[in-house]
Amino acid sequence: MKNEMEIQFSALSQNESFARVSVAAFIAQLDPTMDELTEIKTVVSEAVTNAIIHGYEENPAGTVTITVHLDDDVVGISVRDEGGGIDDVDQAKEPLYTSKPDLERSGMGFTIMENFMDEMSVTSVAGRGTTVYVKKQLSKNKVVNH
Amino acid sequence: MSFSVEVEQKQNILCVRLHGELDHHSASELRAIVDRHLEEHNTKHIVLNAEGLTFMDSSGIGVILGRYKKLQPRGGRLIVCGVSAPVYRLFEMAGLFKVLSLEEQESHALQALGEAV
Ligand SMILES: Nc1ncnc2c1ncn2[C@@H]1O[C@H](COP(=O)(O)OP(=O)(O)O)[C@@H](O)[C@H]1O
Ligand SMILES: [Mg+2]
C-alpha cells in the first residue's frame, strides 16, 4: 500500500522532538521493530537539527518541510529547508566534519543517517537550500502473534 | 519539556543523571547546568548516568565531548554508565570510547574513581 504525509514547522529547536514523534507515529502503521523506530527517529532528528542549525542558523522565520512516503515496507523521508545550502556536499558528509565546532557539533549527523538507513542522498544549492532524502526497507519477517 | 538533569556533588566528582530525550534542544540545558556546576564547585571528574535516557542523537555526543574537554585542564576523567544499546551504538560510531570510559552502573563508576561507596 502507498501512503504519504507532509508536515511543515518553524525552524525552532523545540520542534525537533515534534518532528521525531510525528514521523514515528505515521510509520507505526507498518509495525516497525523498536530498533527500526529508534533508527528512523534518530535520522529525522539529525536532518531536522541540521536544517535548523546549519540551514537557517537558528532563524525561526525559516520553515522545515518533512515528507514521508510509505510504499509497502519501504519508508522514504525527505527533509527540506530553504536555507543557506552546502558548498561542498562530499566534505559535509565526511565523518567528524563540522562547520560549527564552536557550537560543540560532533560532525556525526550524516554518518549516522547513512548508517541507519539503506540509502541517503543530499541535494543542495548554495544560497537556496538543502534536501536530504533517506530510504529504508523495514524487515518483513516480524513476530506477529505475541 | 521531556528532558531533565539531576546533579549531585560527591567530593570532587560531579554525578550527572540524565532523564528523557537528549537532542540539540535539550543539549543546551545540559551544557548550562554542568558548566555552572563546574565553575562553582571543586570538581575534577564527571560521572554521566544515562540510565534514564530514552533518546539521544549526535547533539548528545557533542555536548558530552565538550564537557570531557572542559575536564582536561583539571586532569579529570569522564565516565559514562547506564548506557542503552542505541546510545552505545552512537558512542561507538563517534569513537567516544577512545576518550571516555564506560561502566555498567554509577556505583562502579564511583569506585573506578576511587570514591568510597
Ligand atoms: N541543512 C543544511 N544546510 C546547510 N548546511 C548543512 C545542512 N546539513 C548539514 N550541513 C553542513 O554539513 C556539515 C555536517 O553535518 P553533520 O554531519 O550533521 O554534522 P554537524 O551537524 O555536527 O555539524 C555541517 O557542519 C554543515 O556545514
Ligand atoms: Mg548535524
Image: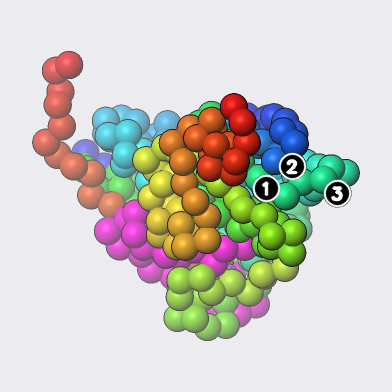
Q: Helix or strand or loop: what does disc 2 sit on?
A: loop
Which amino acid, mark 2? Asn
* Chain hosting mark 2: B
Residue depicted at x 54% and y 67%: A107
Label 1–label 2 contact, CB within 8 A: yes
User: Within 8 Å: ligand 1 and the Cβ of disc 2?
Assistant: no
Mark 2 and mark 3 lie on one chain; the one further toward the N terminus is 2
- Left of A84 or right of it: where is B50? left
Rendered location of residue B102, percent (x, y): 47, 46
Rendered location of residue B68, percent (x, y): 64, 57
* Chain hosting mark 1: B
Q: Residues within 10 Å of mark 3 (few under 14, many from 20)?
A: few
Which amino acid, mark 3? Glu
Q: CA distance from mark 1 to mark 2?
A: 7 Å
According to the picture, the residue beneath numbered tag 1 turns out to be: B45
According to the picture, the residue beneath numbered tag 2 turns out to be: B12
Rendered location of residue B54, percent (x, y): 50, 32
Q: Nearer the viewer, mark 1 or mark 3?
A: 1
